[in-house]
Image: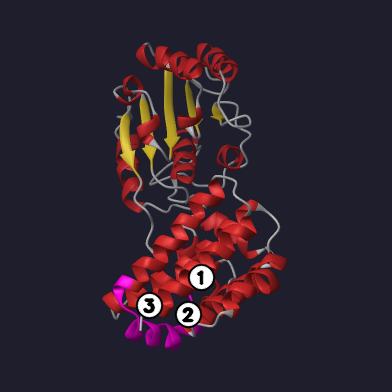
Amino acid sequence: MSTTTIKQPSIQRLFLQLIKKDNLQHAYLFDGKTGTGKKETALWIAQSLFCQNFSDGPCGECHTCQRIASHQHPDVIELEPEGLSIKIGQVRGLKQEFTRSGMEGRKKLVMVKDVEKMTTQAANSLLKFLEEPDGDIVVILMTTAKHQLLPTILSRVQLIHFPQLSKEHRMQALEEAGLSKERASVLSQLTSDTEQALELSENENLTALIEAVWKWYVAFSKKDDQAFIYVHTDIMPLVKEKAEYHRVLDLFLVILQDILNTQLSKDYSIGYLKYQTRIQEEADRLSAVTLADLMDIILTGKKYLDSNVAAQGVLEMSALKMLAAMKRSL
């Protein structure tokens, strides 16, 4: 069987039946958040269509399956944004590929990643092909923002929704990749994308940042005015890029969500597993109103970061507001 990771077994089973019955539609739209397995499933379908030893799925071992896995099969065409968008020239080149018969068979499969990033011209050009398909071609469009697509494109594809994977599933994948349970727990809460979580785990500053954000929260919990100064002394030296400033606030949100969800369910699997006992104490102590206020402050801070307000100023402003919220709590 294929070694391609399948994160959505129910969707896999659906396509296995369609392939066996030779009943694939002309075009599909895979819709779902990053990390839900859209690309992996598209590659699995490609392997299934071209595998030399296909039975209850692709073998994953034949020369054809290996070339598809390494993105080197001439009849499996992959398109993704160049820079910030998919441009008209890319779609025109794609349509030229459509007009040629398969180099190694009669089939072609086309995958378009982040299709919502097509320019208007590119989207209209793709639409013409979807309206008048030519040849034995399967098109798989992938998006994280279905609402941004032209209604005319949506009407010509079969929608397959990829639900977000459970935290337990993501944790298992991270632990199988070699991460400790504590690290996997935080990262699976920080992002729903397993691949991104693995990339983050290689960040040398991440462990220090996780601990720094926890200590920052503890200062707020104690209503210690030093929480404001902590931004300059302990947080800022660990962050250099815009994405890392967002990560500080995202990690703080993980703590707040841990506390809130612990209040709501005894079975909740927390992100800051290392501090489970203290999380429970905070859940017993803080009101839902205070937690909502803190979350709102953090989310507002993220909006300011998106507006390119100076990061240190955003964190310091958030610190002052959270101190005030904590002091009002008791």
Of the pair 12 and 167, the residue shown nearer to us: 167
- Between the C-alphas of marks 2 and 1, the distance is 7 Å
**Which circle, 3 or 1, is nearer the viewer?**
3
Split into 4 quadrants, where in the image is the C terminus?
bottom left
Q: Which residues are magenta?
A: 270-289
State the CA–CA distance, disc 3 to disc 1: 29 Å
Whether the magenta-drawn stretch holds residue 61 is answered as no
Few, some or many residues within 10 Å of mark 1 (<14, 14–19, 20+): many
Whether 318 is drawn above or below 304: the answer is below
For image coordinates 50% across by 34% down, the residue present is: 113
The amino acid pointed to by label 3 is Arg
Q: Secondary structure at mark 3?
A: helix
Residue on which the image places disc 3: 328
Foreground residue among 16 and 10: 10
Count of residue discs: 3
**In the foreground, 294 or 142:** 294
Residue at position x 56%, y 57% in the image: 246
Circles 2 and 1 in contact, beta carbons < 8 Å: yes
* In this rendering, position of residue 115 left or right of residue 195: left
Which secondary structure, mark 2?
helix
**Mark before the other along the chain sequence, 2 or 1:** 1
Q: Is residue 278 magenta?
A: yes
Residue 273: assigned label:
2
